Image (spheres, helix red, strand yellow):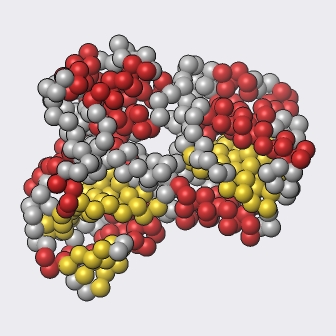
C-alpha cells in the first residue's frame, strides 16, 4: 500500500488496513460458511449435501475470485465446479472454479461471453442440484446479457451516459435490470436448482434487489421506473433507439417484467450478506479508538455529488477546531458511503479523488487536519489510485507547484493534479468491494 509521506502515515495505514481486513472477501465467506461432515452450514441455515446431486458455484464481481477460493476450501471435492467473472486484473488462481476477466465499469465482449457461459451453467441445473451464487461490487457491469433486440454496443453507450449524468447506483441498476436476461431476478428464473447467494454488499442499506442488479432477488422496479430515470436526467434521447424501443415496449406490457416480490420462484432462493460498508466503518472506528482518538461514526452514509459531500465533510474540521463540535481534538470522524460524479469535463479522476480535492479547498490553512477518501476495491474511477489523502497545506502546496486544484475539480481532472501533489493512495486490487471510506482526522 502506497500512502503519501505524512506525519500520520503510520496511523493512516493502520486505519485503512484494519478497515479493509474486516471486509476481506475470503475471510468474510469463511466466516459465513462452515461444514460438519455432509452438512453445509450457511448463516443460520443448514443444507444436507446428500440431498444434492451436484453443487456448483457461479458469480460475478471484483471480489468473487477470493470468495470462490473460500467456497472451494469449505466444500473440497463436493464442489463439482464453478465459474466466476471479475474485473480485468482482479483474477486469482483457483482449483475448481474457472475465473474469467471482463470490463468494468463499461461492459465488454469478454463480459458478454462470461454472462452467456454463466447463464448456460445455471440453466443446466435441476431440482436436485445446489447453486451457490457469489456476488460483489462490479457484477452489474461484468455480466452484460442484453435482451433480444438490444446490442452490447447499445448497453455500453447507455452505461456511459448513466455514469456521466450523476445517476445513483440504484437508478443505474434499474435501467440495467430492464435491459438484461440475467439481472433483476432473471438468473433465479433461469434455473430449477436450490439457490444460495453469498453477497459482499456494495450497496448502502444492503438492498438485495440493487446489489449487482439483483440477479437472484425479486425486483420491485419497473419499465416505467427505467424510462422515468432516463428522462429525469435528460438522457432519454441520448441513449440508443433500440434501448428506448425495448423500454417503451415493456412500459406498454409488451415485454416480460422482471420477477417481483411474492413470486413463488424465490421460495427456493436464500441470500446471505457476508460483509458490507458498515463492517469496514466499524473496524476503522475501533482502530481509531485504540490509537487514542475520540471517534465518531458519521450518522448518515455519504451520498450525492462527490465535491459537495467532500466540502461538507471538510467543513466539520472548522467546527471541531472552533467549538469542539461534534468532537474535541484529537479526534477521528469515520464515514462510509458512495457519492456520485456528474461529469461535465474531459479529465481523469474518480469520486474519492473529487471528494478529497473539494475537502482540501475547505480545510486550506488548518494545521493538523487531514481528510482521506478511498474506494475499498482499490480503484477509484478509471484510475490506478484507490483514493487520496489531503491536509491543511494541500492548497498552499498546489499554489507553490502551480497546480490549479479548483480548476482540476471543475474539469473532472483531479487525478493528474493530486498525482503531481503526491496525495494519491495506491493499494492495488484489495480483494473486497464495499463502497467507500472517508476519514477526517484533527490532531
- Image quarter hosting the N terminus: bottom right
Using the image, determine if residue 88 lies above or below residue 79: above
The quadrant where residue 104 appears: top left
Residue depicted at x 23% and y 60%? 269
**Left or right: 335 as drawn, with respect to 195:** right
- Image quarter hosting the C terminus: bottom right
Residue 91 or residue 210, whichever sits in front: 210
Using the image, determine if residue 103 lies above or below residue 342: below
Image position, residue 320 (x, y; %)? 84, 48
Outermost residue on the top side: it is: 237
Using the image, determine if residue 136 lies above or below residue 387: below
Whether residue 95 appears in this view of the structure is yes
Residue depicted at x 27% and y 19%? 244
Image position, residue 216 (x, y; %)? 26, 52
**Left or right: 176 as drawn, with respect to 316:** left
The quadrant where residue 361 appears: top right
**Left or right: 35 as drawn, with respect to 307:** left
The quadrant where residue 403 appears: top right
Amino acid at each position: 500500500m502506497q500512502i503519501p509521506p505524512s506525519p500520520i502515515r503510520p496511523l493512516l495505514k493502520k486505519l485503512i488496513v484494519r478497515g479493509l481486513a474486516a471486509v476481506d472477501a475470503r475471510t468474510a465467506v469463511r466466516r459465513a460458511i462452515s461444514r460438519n461432515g455432509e452438512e453445509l452450514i450457511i448463516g443460520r441455515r443448514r443444507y444436507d449435501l446428500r440431498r444434492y446431486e451436484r453443487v456448483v458455484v457461479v458469480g460475478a464481481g471484483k471480489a468473487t475470485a477470493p470468495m470462490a477460493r473460500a467456497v472451494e476450501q469449505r466444500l473440497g471435492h463436493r464442489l463439482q465446479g464453478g465459474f466466476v467473472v471479475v474485473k480485468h486484473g482482479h483474477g486469482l488462481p483457483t482449483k475448481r472454479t474457472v475465473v474469467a476477466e471482463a470490463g468494468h465499469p463499461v461492459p465488454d465482449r469478454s463480459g458478454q461471453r462470461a454472462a452467456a457461459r454463466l447463464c448456460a451453467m445455471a440453466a443446466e441445473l435441476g431440482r436436485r442440484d445446489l447453486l451457490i451464487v457469489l456476488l460483489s461490487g462490479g457484477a452489474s457491469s461484468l455480466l452484460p446479457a442484453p435482451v433480444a433486440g438490444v446490442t452490447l454496443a447499445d448497453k455500453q453507450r447507455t452505461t456511459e451516459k448513466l455514469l456521466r449524468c450523476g445517476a445513483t447506483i440504484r437508478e443505474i441498476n434499474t435501467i440495467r435490470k430492464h435491459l438484461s436476461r440475467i439481472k433483476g431476478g432473471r438468473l433465479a428464473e433461469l434455473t430449477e436448482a436450490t439457490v444460495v447467494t453469498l453477497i459482499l454488499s456494495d450497496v448502502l442499506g444492503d438492498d438485495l434487489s440493487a446489489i449487482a442488479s439483483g440477479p437472484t432477488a425479486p425486483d420491485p422496479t419497473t419499465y416505467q421506473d427505467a424510462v422515468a430515470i432516463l428522462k429525469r436526467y435528460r438522457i432519454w434521447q441520448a441513449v440508443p433507439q433500440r434501448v428506448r424501443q425495448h423500454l417503451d415496449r415493456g412500459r406498454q406490457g409488451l415485454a416480460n417484467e422482471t420477477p417481483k416480490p411474492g413470486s413463488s420462484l424465490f421460495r427456493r432462493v436464500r441470500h446471505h450478506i457476508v460483509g458490507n460498508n458498515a463492517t469496514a466503518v466499524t473496524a476503522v472506528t475501533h482502530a481509531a479508538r485504540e490509537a487514542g482518538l475520540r471517534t465518531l461514526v458519521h450518522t448518515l452514509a455519504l451520498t450525492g455529488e462527490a465535491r459537495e459531500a467532500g466540502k461538507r465533510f471538510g467543513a466539520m474540521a472548522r467546527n471541531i477546531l472552533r467549538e469542539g463540535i461534534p468532537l474535541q481534538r484529537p479526534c477521528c470522524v469515520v464515514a462510509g458511503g458512495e457519492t456520485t460524479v456528474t461529469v461535465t469535463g474531459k479529465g481523469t479522476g474518480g469520486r474519492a479523488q473529487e471528494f478529497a480535492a473539494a475537502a482540501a479547498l475547505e480545510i486550506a490553512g488548518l494545521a493538523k487536519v487531514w481528510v482521506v477518501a478511498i474506494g475499498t476495491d482499490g480503484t477509484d474511477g478509471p484510475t490506478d489510485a484507490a483514493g487520496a489523502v489531503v491536509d491543511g497545506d494541500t492548497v498552499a502546496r498546489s499554489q507553490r507547484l502551480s497546480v490549479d486544484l479548483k480548476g482540476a475539480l471543475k474539469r473532472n481532472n483531479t487525478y493528474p493534479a493530486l498525482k503531481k501533489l503526491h496525495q494519491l493512495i495506491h493499494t492495488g486490487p484489495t480483494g473486497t468491494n464495499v463502497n467507500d471510506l472517508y476519514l477526517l482526522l484533527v490532531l
